[in-house]
Image: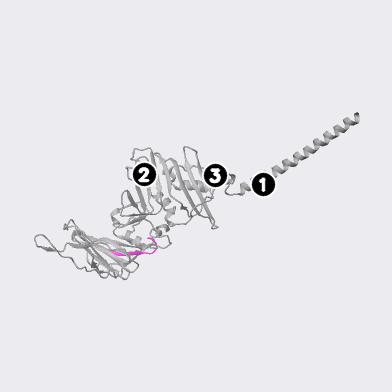
Amino acid sequence: MRDNKNKESKLKLLSSKSWRCIFIISTFIITLFCGVKIYKSATDNTSKLAWYIKNIQNEKRISFTKNNIYEYGVKGIFEDINKKYKLPEKLYMSDDLSVKFEKDGTIIYFETFIYGKDKNGKEKTYLIYYDKNKSKDINLILNGVVNSDYSNDKLLDPLFETVELISIKDTVINYNENEFGLLYKGKVNWESYRDGIVLINKNGEEIPLNLFNGRLIGYPVSIYIPTNEDITPVRYNLLTDSYWFEYLNNDEENLSNEIQQEWNVVEGNSSVKDEFYLYDGIRYKLNIDDKATGSFFYSLHKTNDSGSNWIVINENPFNGAVGETYGIYFINENIGFIGVSRNGGCEGELYRTEDGGKSFSKIEFEGKIVTLDNGTSIMPFDYPSIPYEKDGKLYLNMEQGADGDYDGNSSLVYNSNDKGVTWEYIE
C-alpha cells in the first residue's frame, strides 16, 4: 500500500515538472514569436508602431525665449532652435511662413516647414509649429518628407533682412486691435499691383513707388490684421544689394539686369532720380556740382564696390547745358541714358552714352504733330521718359511736360531696336 502511494507521488512530481518545462518552453516560443513580430512591425515604415516610434524620435520640444517680435524679429525663432539643433546656413521654405502676435509684440502662434543642407551636404528638414495656448515650447519635427526643389523663390534670408530694417511696432501701433499677423510667401510678382506696398532700401528708408511704372517683383513681408480683411496689409519690399536680390527674375544664380534696370534700384541716402544700381556692386550717380537760378550742373560718378569708393567719370556730361535730371539708367557698363528737364519741367531731353559715361549725345526724336479743334497744329509730346527694356527692345513714353494738357495729358510710346540710337513711334 505504501509502495503504491510512493509511486503515485513520483508520478505527480514527474507530471508537474513536465508541465513546468512545457510551460517554460511555450512561453519562450510565444515571447520569441511576438518579439519577432514586434521587431518587424517596428522596422516596417508602413506600420502604425513604426510611425509612432519614429514620431517620438523625431518630435522635439524647444524652449521659446525670444518670443517678442518687436525685440527679436522673426529671426529669434530660429535662433532659439539653432541653440539645440544646428540649422543649415541657407534655409528654404516648403510653403509659407505665418506668425501671429499680440499688441505688445508677444508671439502667440507660428508655423512653417523649412529645409536646407548641412555643411556635409546632407538634407535637413524642420516642421516648426508653436501655439502659445497649447504649449510654452516650440514643437519641432525633424526628418520629414519635403519637396526640396531648392527654389530661390522660397529663400528665408530676405525675410530676416527685411524684418530687421522695418519697425513692426510702428506699423501696428495705430490700429485698435489686439492681434496682428506677419505673412511671408517668398518671391512675389506684383505686376502693376501697388496696394499696401512699401519700398525700402538697405537703410530702412522708404522709396517712392512712382519710381516703378512697370512690373514689381520682390520678397514682400506682409503685416496684416487677421480679424479684419477690409484693412489692406502693409507689404514691405526691400531693395538691396544682398545676394538674394539677384534672383528676382529667375531661379539661377545670375543677376537679373532687366529687373535691376527697370527698378532703378536706390540705396543709401541718394535721390531716386540721381542714382542707378547696375549689378555686382556697380552703381552710377549724378552729383550736383553747382546750382544757379533753378538750374543744375552735374558730374557723373561710378563705384565698383557698392559705394565704398567712387570715381568721377564725366565732369560735364551735358556739354555745358543746364537743367535738372529726372532719371538715370544703364543697360550695361557701356550704354546708358540720363534725362534732363528744361524750362521748369516744361520739356525734357534724353542723353545717351555708349562709352560708359565718358561722353553723351542728345537723342533726337521725330515729333508727332496734332491738330486742335481750332485748326492749330502743335507738338505737345516733348518729354521723353527714362527707357526700359523688355523682350530685347528698349521702350519709353514720350510724355507732355509740366505745361502739357493735350488729350488728358496723354503720352506716346516709342521703341528702339538698336540700343537707343534711333527711336520709332509705335502708339
Label 1 vs 2, first from the N-terminus: 1
Magenta run includes residue 297: yes
Placement of the C terminus among the 4 image quadrants: bottom left
**Left or right for 295, reference 281:** left
Q: Main secondary structure of the magenta part?
A: strand
Label 3 vs 2, first from the N-terminus: 3
Q: Amino acid at mark 2?
A: Tyr
Magenta run includes residue 39: no
Q: Which residue is mark 1?
A: 36
Q: CA distance from mark 3 to mark 2?
A: 30 Å
What numbered label is drawn on residue 222?
A: none
Residue 16: x, y in percent?
80, 35
Residue 382: x, y in percent?
19, 63
**Left or right for 348, reference 28:** left
Q: Residue at x 41, y 63 (%)?
A: 254
Which mark lies nearer to you, 1 or 2? 1
Q: Which residue is mark 3?
A: 60
Where, by quadrant of the figure, is residue 300 drawn? bottom left
Tag 3: Cα neighbours inside 10 Å, few (<14), some, or many (≥20)?
A: some
Residue 45: x, y in percent?
58, 49
**Left or right for 397, reference 161:** left
Circle 1 — which element? helix
Dots 3, 2 in contact, CB < 8 A: no
Q: Amino acid at mark 3?
A: Lys
Q: Amino acid at mark 1?
A: Val
Dots 1, 2 in contact, CB < 8 A: no
In this view of the protein, can residue 414 be seen by the observer? yes
The answer to which of 301 and 83 lies nearer the viewer is 83
Tag 2: Cα neighbours inside 10 Å, few (<14), some, or many (≥20)?
A: many
Q: Is residue 276 above or below residue 54?
A: below
Q: CA distance from mark 3 to mark 1?
A: 29 Å
Q: Which residue is mark 2?
A: 224
